[in-house]
Image (cartoon, coloured by chain):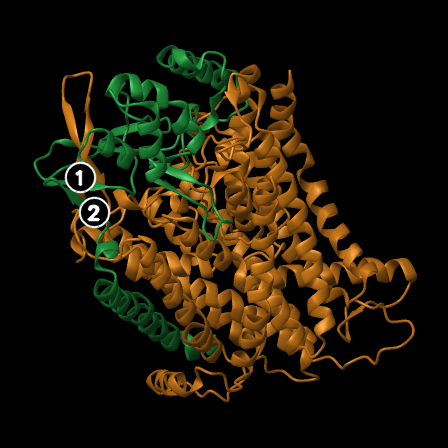
Amino acid sequence: MKTIRQVFGKAFAFIIILTILCGGVYTFAATGIMQLIFPYQANGSISEVNGQKYSYLLGQEFTADNHLWGRIMNIDTGTYTDDNGNPVMYASPSNLSPASDEYKSLVAERVAAIRSAHPEKEGVPIPVDLVTCSGSGLDPHISPAAAYYQAERLARNTGKTVAEVQSIIDQYTEGRLFGIFGEPRVNVLKVNLALDGILQ
Amino acid sequence: MTNTILQYVLYLVILVVLAIPLGNYIGKVMNGERVFLSRILIPCENAMYRLLHVDKEESMGWKKYAACVLLFSGFGFILLFLFHLLQGALPLNPEGLPGTSWHLAFNTTSSFVTNTNWQAYSGESTLSYFTQMMGLTVQNFVSAATGIAVLFVLIRAFTKVQEKGLGNFWVDMTRINLYVMIPICLVITIGLVWQGVPQNFNAYETVTLVEPITLEDGTVITEQIVPMGPAASQIAPKQAGTNGGGFFGVNSAHPLENPTPFSNLLEMISLLLIPVALCFTFGRNIKDKKQGRAIFIAMFFMLVLALGIIAVCEQSATPQLAQNGAVDISMIDQAGGNMEGKETRFGIATSSTWAAFTTAASNGSVNSMHDSYTPLGGMITMLQMQLGEVIFGGVGCGLYGMLAFAILAVFIAGLMVGRTPEYLGKKIEPYEMKMAVMVCLATPVGILIGSGLASLVPEVANSLNNAGAHGFSELLYAYSSAGGNNGSAFAGFNANTVFLNVTIGLVMLFVRFVPMIATLAIAGSLVQKKKVAVSAGTLPTHNALFIGLLIFVVLLVGALSFFPALALGPIAEYFQMLI
């Protein structure tokens, strides 16, 4: 009992001081310094093109025939609204087991839909990124294999040649870090803005 | 293929190469020796002691140290609990988020105070910036520091001879935060913001959708939300302190929480860095580096084994995904394999490595969704938590958990040869054994009782996202995560109900504080003992034989406790997958 009385006040004072230090001072100092050296990133990496704001970090859903398609998305329109109360889009992962019968039929449906949109690719296996939902639900990328798979369809629907489409894909492909870490990836939004002639 | 293997190898190499010097540094700091930051930090440290009227020469007995740990954690608990309930009235809340329910507040508070960071909520839709930074970030620092402090009490118990004092809680906590956690976290924060993690206090932004979405009721959605906040500064201690609670709901899979392979490298290495470093600190500070290395090798062996199994399972994917060859799961121009729940920029190698690291360390942050792993890949992540988080484990607590297993191992060896067991020159007697068993069995007891009870409650079935065996795995994973103070999830499981919030919260508190107090009690007893001279009859605890025995004991306790439960979940699902 005596021990507890001795340390009672100190324990309380200590958590208050550490809250101020590790919560307040640390966070505000980090924010101040980061706003100074990396203002674009610190404010969410939002880019403006032709007067419209875009985020290249967050995935969007593309289903039109003249656009590059990304990962399967699980769209959420019920959680967030803009300043005027209109719903805005967000997304979440599927969290489905890839070993169940339900999953098997789900993927089969996706395969059928992609097959019918890509008659040029008859008999070619579909890259796995095109039939799976990502980890965040907001993956902005697709693998080079999955992007190339769509080149003929994009050429047909945009009036560009297959080579032109492929060169746009290559332009927005990022490689591995130091050639080693992570995976090569194509930014879907950038490719689509380029296909639409918005991004040069 | 070559590149993939190279990634696995390099991740492990970078980890160990950085951990060795850090281990040395932490050892010096905790002994009060000079380090390169001393010039700047000694004045801060002394100011802290003056402010708190701390006598830094005081050395506490184990009971006083335990009282400090419990009271400090208790006050931290009350403060954080209040922040959750009252956040609607507190500042830094541009989204106008209301206070949370009492049971979610209880669950989240238990979770962050115990270094678990299990999350039954999504940060961006539930918590204000104030709660995140003044509440969660603070616990990210101090719950980690508490674990490390208790480890040092145990280390001192082995080095001191016939004394009572085990160190000063206030001094230990101050040093760990000032010299270790804050500098490491500042460096990580800079790297993360550079790569694109937000660090601001702005309201959420909206950006244009290229293809508007039309809902069934005719509403057209033209914009997407971009969540904001002081994210990077919270993600840094979340990784470095084996906390794991994401700023955003989907944790480090979120492109704003982990935008590039570089941010991923930074986060993934830092999540296991301090736990690995502490093995080397241990060897250094007990003045027998071989002992630290032996513990390290035992842990590292199990980590590599787990990583190997996860990697192979995820790369092979499942027949349900491969669709008889209609889906290309090869590694040509893509990561291939089971990409369900994984990000393109991370692919299989980087996701599997993270999954192995985060469940080995009791970190629990994720960069891919474990719920969507293959049955056996997912089972390994679960098993690593069920083994009691001793494969490196949480900062501090992983190592003291492993030392309890080492005590168990010398005891078993002692029984075989009929000698009084001793570890690092201290005799292991019934009292130490009882306490070590409490440390080792708290996790299995917490997990099995928790998940056993939950499977009897009918309403829990509504929380499951998948049917059948995988549904049971979701439930078992939830309690394994709580029972290992890990915090990762099979995230399809909706854990935000009164029953689950309360029971999971209680499991987390039980498995954090029971082993912690038992460890302090072991230290309190060992520190008073004489050093036994090494003789021909002493069991060496640094050679291959002992390392093998230690691994065997860890796996044995885990397998005996969890085989039946695993057979009903992931193993059943595996066989269903093959049919």
Examine the rendered structure and indicate whether residue B572 appears above or below residue B262. above
Relative horizontal placement of residue A97, taking residue B9 as reference (left or right): left
Numbered disc 1: secondary structure:
strand
The mark found on residue B207 in the picture is 1
Report the quarter where the C terminus of chain A lies.
top left
Residue B462 occupies which quadrant of the picture? top left
| Colour that chain A carries in the picture | green
Numbered disc 2: secondary structure:
strand
Near mark 2 (Cα within 10 A), the count class, few <14, some 14-19 or many ≥20, is: some
* Residue at 65 percent of width and 22 percent of height: B575
Instruction: Give the percent coordinates (x, y) of residue B483.
Output: 55, 47
Instruction: Give the percent coordinates (x, y) of residue B111.
Output: 43, 51
- Regarding residue B328, the answer to whether it shows in the image is yes
Examine the rendered structure and indicate whether residue B231 appears above or below residue B216. below
- Regarding residue B492, the answer to whether it shows in the image is no
Label 2: chain? A
| Colour that chain B carries in the picture | orange
Instruction: Give the percent coordinates (x, y) of residue A153.
Output: 33, 18
Give the total of numbered labels.
2
Q: Are marks 1 and 2 in contact (CB under 8 Å)?
A: yes
The mark found on residue A99 in the picture is none
| Residue underneath mark 2 | A46
Amino acid type of the residue that numbered disc 1 sits on in the rendered structure:
Val
